[in-house]
Image: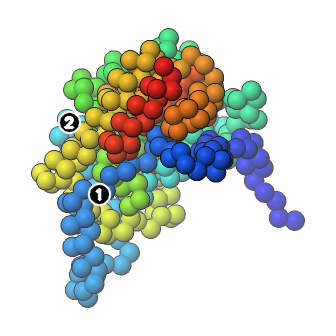
Amino acid sequence: MIRINENYTKLKASYLFSDIAKRVSAYVAANPAKPVIRLGIGDVTEPLPPVCVEALHAATDEMAKRGTFKGYGPEQGYAFLREAVAQHDYAARGCKIEADEIFISDGSKCDCGNIQEIFAQDIRLAIPDPVYPVYVDTNVMAGRTGASIDGRYQGITYLESTPANGYVPSVPNVATDLIYLCFPNNPTGAVATKAQLEAWVAYAKKNKAVILFDSAYEAYIRNPAIPHSIYEIEGARDVAIEFRSFSKTAGFTGTRCAYTVIPKSLMAYDAAGNAHPLHALWNRRHTTKFNGVAYPIQKAAAAIFTDAGKQQTSDLINFYLANAKLIRDAMTKLGFSCIGGDNAPYIWVNTGRDSWAFFDTLLEKAQVVCTPGAGFGKCGEGHVRISAFNSRENVETALTRIAAALK
Ligand code: PLP
């Protein structure tokens, strides 16, 4: 008899965005004359930068000719992209990352979901709350947790982000082995200072732990004192893996390209205490289960590192950040305390009331969709996430409606 992986039955039955979609569809069906503005889901709205489109066309033409056609590429990514990333994203910030420590992939979602495969079953996890749900759910699927009781899976050390700690959790007072951190954060938009990241690197060193650092939103950092990479912290090469994505940097959510950095000096241990380089394990996993990102897509991604590409991506991000500022200023003016939006595309609003009730109020009275914080974890209760990914017109209309509705 074929049997299922019963860990899947531990996953919470409903999924946040499908719950939201159901409520929004029901509202739209009942109120067809009231157009809804969606500031909920974190997908970009602006088209690809022109440099990326030109590179896509040129690479497609190469694929059309016998002399320049390409079949399977290197699973880890073409050298031209790995070298551009090493130079522009790392060397330029003083981080020592070699091109062959960079693994190009089709998304940070897949990478931060798949990475846990190379670790033992019985490791101790530290995961933020609120959180990008992929970190939790993939470990639940792998059987590293117990059941979910009162919104919390047994066996996880939750790193609480609350108003009291400025939404940046400090190191726990228990030892853990695999630590998920995400800055700028989804959903809160919070960023971590150098000193805060130094404390995490020191904690990981002390516990022979590994930090999984998700910096999918690093391009939104505008405060020059905030690190863009965990490798800006002394010693991080020995304790951290970093995930980055072209999705929010250059509008690649539909085009798909990302990368994961695993320094060759990063070790993890077998049961006998012998050290093994994680680079070799991930290389084995990546080359066995993944066949590389399409050549035209990698060419399009590399185009963002040209002078024109840097200008266009910076303009794109400044556009979303200007939306974010409008949202944060408007919500603050209405009396809410907010974080995010200054170095991130998300604004985390402390609503002071049930997050689904606030969601319903905005939907019914302002026809604006936000994301209820409770969907991101227990500590998200009382908050909502508002996303800056939309047109200026929609953001301005949404804010006018919210102000009228909450007056
Ligand atoms: N990490 C975080 C924190 C995200 O918010 C997202 C997307 O929303 C991702 C990773 C996924 O990125 P990708 O589009 O590269 O899969």
For the residue pair 171 and 38, the one nearer the viewer reads as 38
Q: Secondary structure at mark 2?
A: helix
Q: Residue at x 36, y 69 (%)?
A: 294
Q: CA distance from mark 2 to mark 1?
A: 25 Å
Q: Which mark, by number, is residue 93?
A: 2
Residue 14, how many percent across, how many down? 70, 44
Would you say the beta carbon of the disc 1 residue lies within 8 angstroms of ligand 1? no
Quadrant location of residue 355?
Answer: top right
Label 2 crowding class (10 Å Cα cut-off): few <14, some 14-19, many 20+? some
In this view, the residue farthest toward the bottom is 66
Along the line of sight, the residue nearer the viewer: 221 or 276: 221
Q: Residue 109, how many percent across, how many down?
A: 49, 49
Identified by mark 1, the residue type is Leu
Q: Residue at x 40, y 18 (%)?
A: 332
Residue drawn where x is 45% and y is 32% of the image: 401
The reply to whether dot 2 and dot 1 touch (C-beta < 8 Å) is no
Residue that protrudes farthest toward the front in the picture: 33
Position of the N terminus by quadrant: bottom right
Residue 279 drawn at (x, y percent): 41, 49
Q: Is residue 400 above or below residue 334?
A: below
Q: Residues within 10 Å of mark 1 (few under 14, many from 20)?
A: some
User: Residue 184 lies in what quarter of the image?
Assistant: top left
The one nearer the camera, 157 or 253, is 253
State which tag comes first along the sequence, 2 or 1.
1
Q: Could you tell whether 274 is left or right of 198 in the image?
A: right
Q: Which residue is mark 1?
A: 48
Camera-side mark, 2 or 1: 1
Tell me where residue 190 appears, x and y as whole percent: 40, 26
Residue type (three-letter) at the residue carrying disc 2: Arg
Q: Is residue 182 left or right of residue 221?
A: right
Say if residue 294 shows up in the picture: yes
SS at mark 1 in the image = loop
